Image: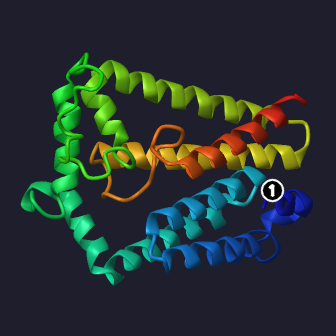
Amino acid sequence: MSDNLSRKGEKVKTFLQGVLPVLIVSGIFAGLIIAEPNMSTSVIVMATAFSMLFVAGAKVSQLSVILILGAVVAFFAMKSADYRWRRFTAFLNPWADPLGDGYQAIQSLYALGAGGFFGVGFGQSRQKNYYIPEAQNDFIFAIIGEEFGFIGVFFIILLFTILIWRGIRIAINCKDRFGMLLAAGITSLIAIQSSINLLVVSSSMPVTGVTLPLISYGGSSLLFTLISLGILLNISRDL
């Protein structure tokens, strides 16, 4: 996508030649992923494509329309699957079904609340002992909050903020358009994925299965995130 957008030049400001081809290609990938079904990852794919279009110089008016249409599509995608809609309603009031669809969000909030300012201590989490499902994956941030408290949570958010800020700086200072778009795309991918995970764990959006980059359990996720960061570092060498 970086190569395609860099070669388009000013054509990216047109809908048919610039925006539409990107939407079609990314939409095919997102469609295959949502058919698995995996709505959260398809949202990350489309959000990353949207970010790259914005950085490439697509018109804000066109992107605004796409954003509205995307929200409508996401709403109907939630309505089309009963479990997705239950997750959405559980997000609005998790305590309405504390042992069902609201269980994971409630247990995550218990973990964050129990941590207080300094946490209960490394390895002393109670919520990871079968109270929070997938505690080592999607909800690892809640366990960090419980064991290390506000200090640990603040430190993790600060590290991600620095990483994203440095990625943006690399993109801004890159000398060629391809490198700029590639750096922006990698940074957007990490920023979007980490933001969704933190929002889910803090019950600020419906529960969905998105891992926290570099921290959640999973070798393949870690491998490809490190490869992406390696590419980002390589781009920064020519600044």
The residue tagged 1 is 2
Q: Which of 86 and 65 is in front in this view?
A: 86
Q: In which quarter of the image is the C terminus?
A: top right
Query: Residue 75 location in percent, x, y?
Result: 38, 74
Query: Residue 220 location in percent, x, y?
Result: 59, 52
Query: Residue 54 location in percent, x, y?
Result: 69, 54
Q: What amino acid type is highlighted by mark number 1?
A: Ser
Label 1 Cα neighbours within 10 Å, binned few <14 / some 14-19 / many ≥20: some
> Residue at image x 36%, y 27%?
153
Q: In this view, does 214 lie above or below 207?
A: above
Q: Which of 75 and 65 is in front in this view?
A: 75
153 relative position to 170: left or right = left
Choose top left, top right, bottom left or bottom right for residue 179: top right
Choose top left, top right, bottom left or bottom right for residue 8: bottom right
> Residue at image x 56%, y 78%?
31
Question: In this figure, which colouring scheme has been used for the structure?
Answer: rainbow
Q: Quadrant of the N terminus?
A: bottom right
Disc 1 on helix, strand or loop?
helix
